[in-house]
Image (tube, grey):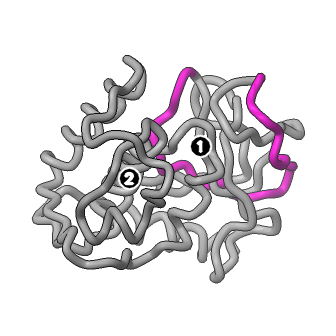
Amino acid sequence: MRKFLAAFICFTTLLATPLAAQQDDPLCEDLWFARNLIHDRAGYCFSSPLGQAQFDNSDCTTRNATLAPAQAAQVARIRQSESQYSCNLDTNRTWLTYPDELEPYRRMADVPVRDFGATGCIGYRGPVLTLRNGASHAAAAIGQLRPGASITFAHWPLNGWSYVSIYPQGYAPDGPADWGWVAIGEGMPPCDSYAG
């Protein structure tokens, strides 16, 4: 199981290495989706085929959505990452390459934003921690991080919280079993080993 998680971390790190990004690069799609999910929540009306396919325009209110300062700063940072990574997503298409990986973002009160690399904790040895749908103790509890699980960190931290993918019994080829925000504290948590 450890070899599989280490291979997954290495693979996602290679995918996220900022060389010449392609139009359907998973990181570019991830950044595009997170940025536009923030706009969707602010009432933005999408005009591109991809935007209309991914977000429901039935409740949109404007083509010039006003974002709260925190969301505006997050969008600016995402745009900077998209520029740094040379993202050039074709928004005339109507599909994303890995939609199942992005679907959990919709359930989050705080939108997770993918980073350029990934780090893994194999065999978590800390206390049971609550997974939440946002980066706050006031956010809804949606699961638990339990000892023995493997964790992937591949998103920007927010207010001391980490958005994580959880593999309860170690890495599983069909993907993580849970996602959410968790307050782990500074640095990496205690683990049997680390990858990435």
Magenta stretch: includes residue 22: no
Instruction: Count the marks.
Output: 2
Write down the quadrant of residue 57 in the picture: bottom left
In the displayed structure, 7 sits above or below 167; it is below
Q: Secondary structure at mark 1?
A: strand
Residue at 87% across / 36% down in the picture? 127
Choose the circle earlier in sequence order: 2 or 1: 2
Q: Secondary structure at mark 2?
A: strand
> Is 38 situated left or right of 130 in this image?
left
Q: Nearer the viewer, residue 19 or 44?
A: 44
Neighbourhood count class around disc 2 (C-alpha, 10 Å): few under 14, some 14–19, many 20 upward: many
Q: Amino acid at mark 2?
A: Gly
Residue 130 position in % (x across, y down): 83, 38
Residue at 41% across / 66% down in the picture? 12
Residue at 46% across / 55% down in the picture? 196
In the displayed structure, 20 sits above or below 68; it is below
Q: Amino acid at mark 1?
A: Tyr
Magenta stretch: includes residue 147: yes
Residue at 25% across / 78% down in the picture? 93
Boundaries of the magenta span: 138-159
Residue 98 position in % (x across, y down): 45, 75
Q: Nearer the viewer, residue 127 or 73?
A: 73
Q: Inspect this view and state whether residue 108 appears.
A: yes
In the displayed structure, 77 sits above or below 104; it is above
The residue that label 2 is drawn on is 117
Residue 177 position in % (x across, y down): 74, 66
The residue that label 1 is drawn on is 163
Comparing labels 2 and 1, the label whose residue is closer to the camera: 1
Q: Inspect this view and state whether residue 114 appears.
A: no
The residue furthest bottom is 173
